[in-house]
Amino acid sequence: MSARDSVPGAARAVAALVERAAARGATHLVTPEMILTGYHASFSQAERDRAVEEVVRPAARRARLTLMLGAGTFVSPSGRRLRKPLNQVLVIGPDGDIVGAHSKTIPTGGDLKWSTRGRPSDLKVFRSGGLVFGCLICNDFWATPRYTALPDLNLPVRLARMGARVIFHSIASGFDRAYLDFHTRRLEERAIRGRVWVAGANAVNNPGKPVNAPSGVVDPGGRWRIRAPGRGERLYALKVSIG
């Protein structure tokens, strides 16, 4: 997906995507990083909460679909108001209830200027729609050199060891093509090392430039089962058997 100009507009776009995905038989859907609130700290928490409660959760409930929604929040896991927001994936179950959330654990240096880092100790797996899975956000997966001052914690393999069979990856990686091969190979390598499926969605915010990390599905052998073009909005679906 590409970013929208407002939180309500983004919520409507996500709800429409949920409806389209359900029509294609999807049971789980992942969106790009911070797609609901925008990739910044200037969103309204109240507007964000209304969008989730009034638009996105009802859409997931109607579709009977588990949604991994990229969104910011100024509310900590303990309910405390934060000065800088968490960059988060909100997991919404097929009954519309919130299953949990993952906060970006390896933010880039640029991220740290406006967002709060998620705690590595909060890493968890989720169970929804008959699937055990984990969620990661962009740099969590690959710890891109030069952009990352924090240590690479190899979170995909950690999640696999915790029992995840699939990792849903919300991305907003940008357009510097020097990193395309690195991101692509890292997706393949860590799928192999963890023996997990990886399903990712990148933000395609510039129609004139392809993104530098592919959206798609990588199997536990490191093979791309679906790889979306680097430009333009797409809905891709893949039916797999995960024992």
Image (cartoon, rainbow, N blue to C red):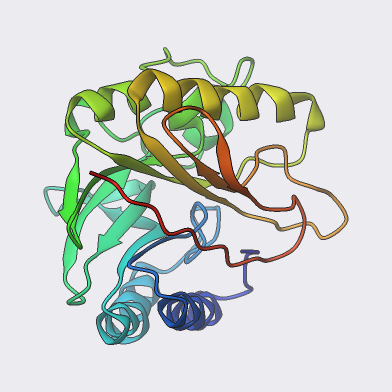
| Residue 40 spot, x, y in % from top left | 54, 53
Whether residue 107 is visible: no
Quadrant of the image occupied by residue 4: bottom right
* Furthest residue in direction left, as rendered: 78
Please tell me which residue is depicted at 75% across the width and 63% down the height of the picture.
Answer: 232
In the rendered view, would you say 82 is above or below 128?
above
Using residue 117 as the reference point, say whether residue 171 is left or right of it.
right
| Residue 88 spot, x, y in % from top left | 36, 50
Please tell me which residue is depicted at 75% across the width and 50% down the height of the picture.
Answer: 230
| Residue 222 spot, x, y in % from top left | 51, 28
Residue nearest the observer in this picture, 112 or 51:
51
Please tell me which residue is depicted at 76% across the width and 40% down the height of the picture.
Answer: 175
Using residue 78 as the reference point, say whether residue 62 is left or right of it.
right
Residue nearest the observer in this picture, 136 or 38:
136
Using residue 52 as the reference point, say whether residue 203 is left or right of it.
right
In the rendered view, would you say 63 is above or below 197?
below
* Furthest residue in direction top, as rendered: 151
Quadrant of the image occupied by residue 135: top left
Residue nearest the observer in this picture, 53 or 197:
197
Q: Quadrant of the C terminus?
A: top left
Q: Quadrant of the N terminus?
A: bottom right
| Residue 233 spot, x, y in % from top left | 68, 66
Whether residue 204 is visible: yes
Please tell me which residue is depicted at 17% across the width and 77% down the height of the picture.
Answer: 95
In the rendered view, would you say 243 is above or below 75?
above
